Structures are given as structure tokens and as C-alpha cells.
Amino acid sequence: KKIAVFASGNGSNFQAIIDVVKSGELEADIAILVCDKPGAFAIERANAARIPTFAFSPKEYSSKEAYEKAILEKLASSGVEFIVLAGYMRLIGPTLLGDFAGRIVNIHPSLLPAFPGKDAIGQALAAKAEWSGVTIHYVDEGMDTGPIIVQERVRLSEKETRESLQRKIQDIEHKLYPSILQMLLTRGEVQHDEKARTY
Ligand code: GRF
């Protein structure tokens, strides 16, 4: 299947996906990177992997509808069937959702519905949460609100820091996203026992 990855920043999850496509563990073709930050490191990763990029500045468009239409044109011309959000820091609007209903997934660094939105790791630390983790979910119009596909838990230690928690969460993300994408793209679903798996 041809997929698009959407990223706004560093793109370490994007890199993990590039790596498993190369190794054959993920049977997908990354047709395009969509990036709303023209200076993002994710773009360098795409260039290094010879993946075409659509980088745009939202402020150069008159509306969200206008830039989402531009994105849709790029997706159509590259034959994209499925959208993978990987650190894309914008809500998906009705224009994209209309064409890709049920075919957009996101990864979020908390156990949703806890700590949605920005800086989920900081929110978990500030709340002195005992548990946090990673959620992969379908995307709807809300902020991290769509149907949950899978979650994995992480216990916060007494001396947890932002760096240590971020490392734990990203380690999980980089393994979990590729394996769940492989199930979704080849079988269209995630098995129940796999949903229940915890590390
Ligand atoms: C990840 O923690 C992801 O869960 C969240 O944004 C972060 C992106 O990191 N949505 P990276 O750009 O993939 O390194």
C-alpha cells in the first residue's frame, strides 16, 4: 500500500517507518512526506531516503481548507491510500478527513484519553502520574480523540525525568508503530491479543 507520512519536527518515528520499509518488515511504500514546517529535520530524513516531500507553510494559504486541498492533490497524484501521522502538530480538518475517513492514524505519547494535546510527557510528569504510555488511534476531527487501536503502558519511576520518560516512550513508539502499521495495512485490523499486549 502507498502511504503518506505527516510530520512537523524531528521525525524519529518517520525514520523508524523508513527503516522497516527498507528491511521489508513493513510492506508499504512511503509515497510522500507531508510537512508543515519547511525547516524540519524530518525533511532531511526524507531526502536521505529519496522520499518525495510536500513541505508547505500554512500561513501562505488563505485557510486550512486551502492547504488541505493542496495536500489532497499531492496525495492523489502520488496514489496515497493511507495517512500516518508521526508528530504532525496540527488538527486534521474536514477536507482531509472527508477523503480519508478511517484511513488516518496517529501516535500519541500518553495513555489517551489522559494527557491529550501538546507536551503529553510534561503533562504526565506534572500530574505525578504513576503510569503513562503510548496510544495509536484513528484520527477524527478532535484533538487526540479518535477510536483507540492499541496502547502500551510505561510506569513512571520516582526519579523520572523528562529525558528518561521521553526515551522510554520513544523506544516503545519506534517498535509499536511499525508493527501495528503492518497489521493495519496488510490485514486491515489489529488482533485482540495483540491489542492487549503490554511490555
Ligand atoms: C512522538 O512522541 C509522537 O507520539 C508525538 O510526537 C512525537 C514525535 O516525535 N505525536 P518524532 O518527530 O517522531 O521524533
Image (tube, helix red, strand yellow):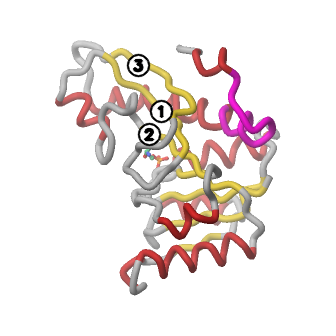
Q: Earlier in the sequence, mark 2 or mark 3?
A: 2
Q: Is residue 189 left or right of residue 141?
A: right
Q: Which residue is mark 3?
A: 154
> Of the residues shown, which amino acid type is indicated by label 3?
Val
Classify 10 Å Cα crowding around label 3: few (below 14), some (14-19), many (20 and above). some
Q: In the rendered view, would you say 38 is above or below 166?
A: below
Single out the mark in the foreground, 2 or 3: 2
Q: CA distance from mark 2 to mark 3?
A: 13 Å
> Of the residues shown, which amino acid type is indicated by label 2?
His
Secondary-structure class at tag 3: strand
Q: In the rendered view, would you say 123 is above or below 12?
A: above
Classify 10 Å Cα crowding around label 2: few (below 14), some (14-19), many (20 and above). many
Q: From which residue to which does the magenta span run? A: 180-191
Q: Position of residue 38 (x, y in %)?
A: 46, 73
Q: Position of residue 97 (x, y in %)?
A: 55, 61
Q: Quadrant of ligand 1?
A: top left
Residue 12 covered by magenta stretch: no
Q: Which residue is mark 2?
A: 108
Single out the mark in the foreground, 3 or 1: 1
Q: Is residue 137 left or right of residue 169?
A: right
Q: CA distance from mark 1 to mark 2?
A: 5 Å
Q: Which residue is mark 1?
A: 135
> Of the residues shown, which amino acid type is indicated by label 1?
Thr
- Magenta stretch, main secondary structure, is helix
Marks 1 & 2, CB-CB < 8 Å contact: yes
Residue 98 picture quarter: bottom right
Q: Earlier in the sequence, mark 3 or mark 1?
A: 1
Secondary-structure class at tag 2: strand
